[in-house]
Image: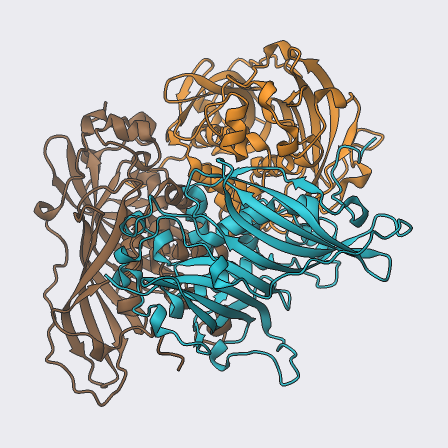
Chain colours: A orange, B brown, C cyan
Amino acid sequence: MSGSKTSSGNFFEDFRLGQELVHATPRTVTTGDAALYTALYGSRFPLTSAASFARATGLPDTPLDDLLVFHVVFGKTVPDVSLNAVANLGYAECRFLKPVYPGATLSTRSEVIGLKENSNGKTGVVYVRSIGRDETGEAVLDYVRWVMVRKRDEATPAPAPVVPTLKAALDPSELVMPAGFEPDGYDTLLAGSPHLFDDYSVGERIDHVDGMTIEEAEHMLATRLYQNTSRVHFNQHVEGKGRFGRRLIYGGHIISLARALSFNGLGNGCFVVAINGGSHTSPTFAGDTIYAWSEILDKAEAGPKAGYLRIRTCAAKNHACTDYPDRDADGKRRAEIVLELDYWVMMPRVQR
Amino acid sequence: MSGSKTSSGNFFEDFRLGQELVHATPRTVTTGDAALYTALYGSRFPLTSAASFARATGLPDTPLDDLLVFHVVFGKTVPDVSLNAVANLGYAECRFLKPVYPGATLSTRSEVIGLKENSNGKTGVVYVRSIGRDETGEAVLDYVRWVMVRKRDEATPAPAPVVPTLKAALDPSELVMPAGFEPDGYDTLLAGSPHLFDDYSVGERIDHVDGMTIEEAEHMLATRLYQNTSRVHFNQHVEGKGRFGRRLIYGGHIISLARALSFNGLGNGCFVVAINGGSHTSPTFAGDTIYAWSEILDKAEAGPKAGYLRIRTCAAKNHACTDYPDRDADGKRRAEIVLELDYWVMMPRVQR
Amino acid sequence: MSGSKTSSGNFFEDFRLGQELVHATPRTVTTGDAALYTALYGSRFPLTSAASFARATGLPDTPLDDLLVFHVVFGKTVPDVSLNAVANLGYAECRFLKPVYPGATLSTRSEVIGLKENSNGKTGVVYVRSIGRDETGEAVLDYVRWVMVRKRDEATPAPAPVVPTLKAALDPSELVMPAGFEPDGYDTLLAGSPHLFDDYSVGERIDHVDGMTIEEAEHMLATRLYQNTSRVHFNQHVEGKGRFGRRLIYGGHIISLARALSFNGLGNGCFVVAINGGSHTSPTFAGDTIYAWSEILDKAEAGPKAGYLRIRTCAAKNHACTDYPDRDADGKRRAEIVLELDYWVMMPRVQR
């Protein structure tokens, strides 16, 4: 009798190639969410902080932080895609297509674009392309992610394996300049950083200096704000008996923290326009202090007034990034690294 | 000299039958409160999550969660009614009369409807009927609660005992359909649950599966958001020397958590329309993990398109509800049960 | 290569007398910030709680808490003024010039009004007058603060010492009545306190009774909400090895907590109109329980309907203020005192 009403999520054999998943729980994002986002990460990027600053650059209002939008759009996919996930394996080709303003209602749909059963017959990898849309139906975000999902029944025959070809990085020509943004009105003094697009060099590395310690209440407030239902973040009664003995922090919380820390050194990287990929290389727990450093991987002009910086940001736990902790000689990441994120930001070239 | 300016709350002999209490601190509720409520409980009920969803069902905007309204209205009564309470004994006949939207200003008045001194001469039971109104003066919520309050002076003679007759449960005919709600526009796909009113049977039990661990910061943020001044929730310096050695979590925090957990299994129970009664059977503390299960107690049609489900939800601490923890053979509740809540929700019968 | 992009803040020799500092990160304050502020401190002052109450007193809307405005305006100065501060020495002549409503965008500029190198040649004291303005350019707040800042290079010659003359307290004639406020519409019943301006006497002391325990998540959420980047509040990895072994709580968090506690006894002190000075006499840490008591230092009429009370509020940690903890016979503050704040509040004289 029970169980029938309760969703137990999808198992590997529930996914079919080409299947469209209409995710539940559309979400209106508001200035309340923006305030909480500031309280959670202390972000100082000026466009998301001040309406006056946003309007001076041609925007109608203060946009919501791109990563807040990402987390909300992503959160909707969890009950359908990753409730029975053994591992979140990766994401790619994530583009931010349109700034989102308070009052917008976000919803998400996904298409299954790849399926590959693992040789153990117990799990399989599911690839989905997810699109977040606002209430007008316009896409604000799309991305691909792939997760390893349990099979309900090992005896179910494996589907024909299909693995999509994914780009290592989006090409600058595929990036979308945030609609309405006019770099002419951008004021570097008020933005808090004098360094513009042309001041950065490929290969340059920046230690973002500051560290931020995470509390249980903080990551849980954040993850619930995103309506992300992944159980490992919330239930100490179960996790206390598990592999780590602790609740795991949602990887996106670390992404947002690293982005906020990156303000110190990349303060004019005012929009995240794409995420090429990311690896959560080590789990993080309450009590960990997160630091970050970045490397400029690539640059691309976007007309005379703005450009795109491709950045690799590494976050480390309980280890200041003065030594730019990275991979060892044999390519193995150092244990303190918890996140490696490859993304494009838009940065103005001119100053008012 | 001091003390005269500081409110020490009312004692048993300060209450008179028929007395009206005008509670202080009217409160404008906003999208900021709604965002915090989502961050605190992770609620996914669609009407309170998305303006587009709410509008499709005929509502003018995203209503605030019914229980947020309850907590705000309730919080106002604490300084006058329960600051010197020995125990919150119960509540009954709670009806939600009108959806509340961001921007509404809530205030509360109570009438003393019963008084009964205890035989020990040290305490007495005070019954109040409280009405929460919005800024137009329209009632949004009414309920009865009774608390055991200390006497200031044991020598004060007892008043004539008056104990109001309270209903064990509201009759379906007394329930108020949320104004403007049109089930025709309700989309079960976006709501995240296919199960509608006619799919539930009286006697059916549902384990809501998930567990949520509570942190000190979370329950204190919530209880302050509701401007509930009950001291036991906030002061570790005092509570550390008390009976439990810990701050007690506001019972309403557990109600909201149980309601949010109940989404998994009762996802289309989109409005709480009444609370028949509730018992906080065991205290909860930071670090506890809350689980919940529900039983359908009764059903009543509300026209061809919606119905009311009477639900008993039990919350348990540090105990998964796969075994539906309940009363023993002798009627005694199992120790892990922290809340038993008897309430009516409105659920659509049709799907778009 | 690195370091050049990262701001390391100003050192003593970077400041010049008369220099204007345009602080970064303008900030639009919203109802989201107001909700968080309520959740963080549980404030019950009615003007900031209810739009209906604010409108009845002639205001166009619910103003934001004066101290929220203070913290936001103050936070902007940290990256330029106090990132390399050894100590925050004091503040003075702080006037609240105009109520701030949701939607306003706050920004801050400071002028260096004093410089005095210390005799050790390693540090110096910097005095700045900071002005917070809204998006129309009107000043909402101004104040002086002075901090002890490290020199980058001890060999740099000392500037000619200039120490501004600062008032011990603002004169009532310098205080600004909040624009639009009409005491006629003030309802003491809804405000929750019957005591008005004429009920208070100079020398009167009030124990605010209640205590509030602070959690790490709470003070960090608050301090990030204010975009205050002072590192000692956030990084346990570093602070754990430091003098206290703990993250320090932002002094302004204690001010806000003491103000919220002061409602019980000073409930109609509805606006803070000035801060004459404040001393954070002892550090506070997560786990501390804050209590407060106040003394009326002075009174000044502001016409027939309102007046100003000059108040000294002392906050103590882990010590109930029934004994009004204060200075010893030799003028030394008792160890439990963490804050001494000297300020003016506006309080109505009439009741509706």
Q: Is residue C170 above or below residue A64?
A: below
Q: Quadrant of the C terminus of chain A?
A: top right
- Residue C19, quarter of picture: top right
Numbered circles on residues, count? 0
- Residue C89, quarter of picture: bottom right
User: Which residue is rendered at x = 30% and y = 28% of the image?
Assistant: B53
Q: Is residue A265 above or below residue A275?
A: below
B234 or B31: which is nearer to us? B31
Outermost residue to the bottom:
B155
Residue C280 lies, in percent from the top left, at: 62, 65
Residue C341 lies, in percent from the top left, at: 55, 66
Residue A297 lies, in percent from the top left, at: 74, 21
The answer to whether residue C222 is left or right of residue C180 is right
A92 or B217: which is nearer to us? B217
Q: Is residue B199 above or below residue C142?
A: above
Q: Is residue B45 above or below residue A272?
A: below
User: Which residue is rendered at x = 42% and y = 30% of the image?
Assistant: A102
Is residue B273 visible in the rendered image? The answer is yes
User: Which residue is rendered at x = 75% and y = 23% of the image?
Assistant: A200
B216 or B98: which is nearer to us? B98
Q: Quadrant of the N terminus of chain A?
A: top left
Is residue B294 visible in the rendered image? The answer is no
